[in-house]
């Protein structure tokens, strides 16, 4: 189930094997995605205990949840900029250290102010990992396996969330008590240490080496991660991309071409689309919402595990679908499916009574949970994996780190706004109106996807760059020599 190229890479399909080092690189690097998922998912269960221990209000609940996302937005744009200069590997190493510090700080926070501060620090690492890990993988793996290894990042994110939900329920069952949340938050130190140690022994990407004129090191990485028959061809494409007249002039003047700016704007739109579905209200606040429908604490925690299981299963499905269908069809399917499901949940909570014979309607609670699971089928099986894959491959080499960082910044600022406002929206407008609002936003997002969603399947990074340059450039004249 490998991609074939529409632009000349089909002939390399048989000759481009996935060397063992590529698999090791992908696994270690995507531990950043595992930490991303764990640190965003763990708060769902921790809030149930933290709100009593730290005396949280709806405002401070939103701040504890959302300040990690605010930090991730800043971390993404900062990491994206410096990664182009200092390298993808060095930034991932720094992010691993910040993961350790942030996790320990959150686990030992004595009050809500310190908790919010360390959640922000932890967010810097979350955003940095979200921006750089997909770029690192996309630049280092063979073109015909890029879809598989970049989407591994999404699989690790949802796996981290599943681990968080499962450990939340297990820790509560074993220890319980108001301080249970400290153990929940502290566990993240373990994969952070593994990520830091593992990255010490991995190379940077061949394209980053080439961007800085270090062609010998670029070739060395290609020889270690490719079949020998395709090294010369890929090295030639990289050299050609770096040696075009327009590219040389832009690097010398340190300017960004008009077509690149348009491409960054498109990337921002694709990134925001993924969060405007409201997915993280379900991932962050599922136990809170289920409690609001009448389920108890233990039942809410256990039911939330189903969200994590479905997310992992559907990400596997999404990875398989990407090998058969293009990016654009899956993006459209995910967006339309998420919007319709949000509308259905809103109708369900509106039409069904909250209580039956003076008791909470348990059937209503489980139907809401079922709606959440169907929503996640579309989100994690189509919309999310396609988004991360597109962002990792659609930008030209010279601005890839910066452009991906800006796009993830926009994604996480959207995420931050939703996570911060959701508890207050839930308290003020109720569950029904909140879901209707997300459905309305989803309709607008669907229109954007129909008009602008790109297709990049079956092309090398250099071919993708050439494609966007051709279609987004005002004046075709500078294309000669590229």
Image: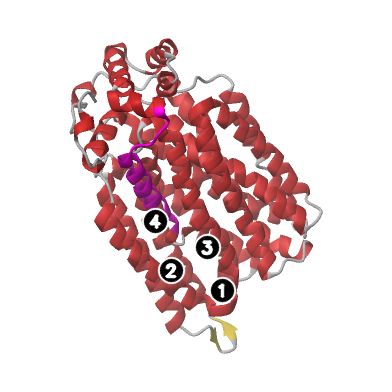
Neighbour class for label 4 at 10 Å: few (<14), some, many (≥20)?
many
Q: Which residue bears the numbered disc 3?
A: 418
Q: Main secondary structure of the magenta part?
A: helix
Q: What is the distance, in whole Å, between disc 1 and disc 4 at their CAs?
A: 22 Å
Mark drawn on residue 438: 2
Neighbour class for label 1 at 10 Å: few (<14), some, many (≥20)?
some
Residue closest to the eye, 403 or 299: 403
Rendered location of residue 152, percent (x, y)? 43, 38
Residue closest to the eye, 270 or 49: 270
Rendered location of residue 310, percent (x, y)? 44, 54
Q: Which residues are magenta?
A: 253-275
Looking at marks 2 and 1 on the same chain, the residue that comes earlier in the sequence is marked by 1
Q: Which residue bears the numbered disc 1?
A: 426
User: Residue pushed farthest front?
Assistant: 253
Q: Which residue bears the numbered disc 4?
A: 273
Rendered location of residue 300, percent (x, y)? 59, 65
* Quadrant that contains the C terminus: top left
Callouts 3 and 2 close, C-beta under 8 Å:
no
Instruction: Evaluate whether residue 175 shows in this view.
Output: no
Neighbour class for label 2 at 10 Å: few (<14), some, many (≥20)?
many
Looking at marks 4 and 3 on the same chain, the residue that comes earlier in the sequence is marked by 4
**Is residue 200 toward the left or the right of residue 55 in the image?**
left
Residue 5 falls in image quadrant: top left
Q: What is the distance, in whole Å, between disc 2 and disc 1 at their CAs?
A: 12 Å
- Residue at position x 25%, y 56% in the image: 451
Looking at marks 1 and 4 on the same chain, the residue that comes earlier in the sequence is marked by 4
Q: Secondary structure at mark 4?
A: helix
Looking at marks 4 and 2 on the same chain, the residue that comes earlier in the sequence is marked by 4
Callouts 1 and 4 close, C-beta under 8 Å:
no
């Amino acid at each position: 189930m490998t991609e074939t190229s529409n632009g000349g890479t089909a002939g390399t399909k048989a000759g481009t094997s996935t060397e063992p080092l590529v698999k090791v690189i992908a696994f270690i690097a995507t531990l950043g995605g595992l930490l991303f998922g764990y640190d965003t998912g763990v708060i769902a269960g921790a809030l149930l205990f933290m709100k009593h221990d730290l005396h949280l209000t709806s405002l401070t609940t939103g701040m504890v949840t959302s300040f990690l996302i605010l930090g991730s937005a800043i971390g993404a744009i900062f990491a994206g900029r410096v990664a182009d200069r200092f390298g993808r590997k060095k930034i991932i190493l720094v992010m691993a250290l910040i993961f350790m510090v942030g996790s320990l700080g959150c686990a030992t926070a004595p009050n809500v102010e310190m908790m919010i501060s360390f959640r922000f620090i932890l967010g810097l690492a979350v955003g940095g990992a979200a921006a750089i890990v997909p770029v690192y993988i996309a630049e280092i793996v063979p073109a015909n396996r890029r879809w598989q290894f970049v989407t591994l990042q999404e699989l690790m994110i949802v796996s981290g969330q599943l681990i968080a939900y499962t450990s939340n329920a297990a820790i509560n069952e074993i220890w319980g008590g108001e301080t249970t949340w400290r153990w929940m938050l502290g566990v993240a130190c373990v994969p952070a240490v593994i990520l830091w140690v593992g990255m010490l022994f991995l190379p940077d990407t061949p394209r980053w080496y080439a961007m800085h004129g270090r062609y010998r090191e670029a070739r060395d990485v290609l020889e270690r991660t490719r079949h020998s028959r395709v090294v010369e061809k890929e090295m030639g494409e990289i050299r050609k991309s770096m040696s075009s007249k327009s590219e040389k002039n832009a690097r010398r003047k340190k300017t960004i071409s008009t077509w690149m700016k348009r491409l960054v704007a498109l990337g921002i739109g694709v990134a925001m689309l993924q969060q405007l579905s409201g997915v993280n209200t379900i991932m962050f606040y599922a136990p809170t919402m289920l409690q609001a429908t009448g389920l108890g604490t233990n039942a809410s925690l256990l039911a939330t595990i189903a969200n994590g299981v479905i997310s992992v299963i559907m990400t596997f499905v999404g990875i398989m679908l990407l090998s058969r269908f293009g990016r654009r069809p899956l993006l459209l399917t995910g967006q339309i499916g998420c919007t319709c499901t949000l509308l259905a949940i809103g109708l369900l909570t509106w039409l069904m009574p909250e209580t039956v014979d003076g008791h909470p309607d348990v059937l209503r609670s489980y139907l809401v949970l079922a709606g959440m699971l169907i929503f996640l089928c579309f989100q994690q099986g189509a919309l999310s994996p396609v988004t991360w894959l597109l962002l990792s491959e659609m930008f030209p080499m010279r601005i890839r780190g910066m452009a991906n960082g800006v796009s993830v910044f926009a994604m996480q600022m959207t995420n931050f706004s939703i996570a911060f406002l959701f508890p207050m929206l839930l308290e003020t407008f109720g569950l029904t109106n909140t879901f209707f609002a997300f459905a309305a936003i989803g309709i607008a997002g669907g229109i954007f996807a129909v008009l602008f969603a790109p297709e990049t399947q079956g092309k090398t990074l250099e071919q993708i760059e050439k494609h966007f340059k051709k279609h987004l450039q005002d004046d075709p004249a500078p294309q000669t020599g590229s």
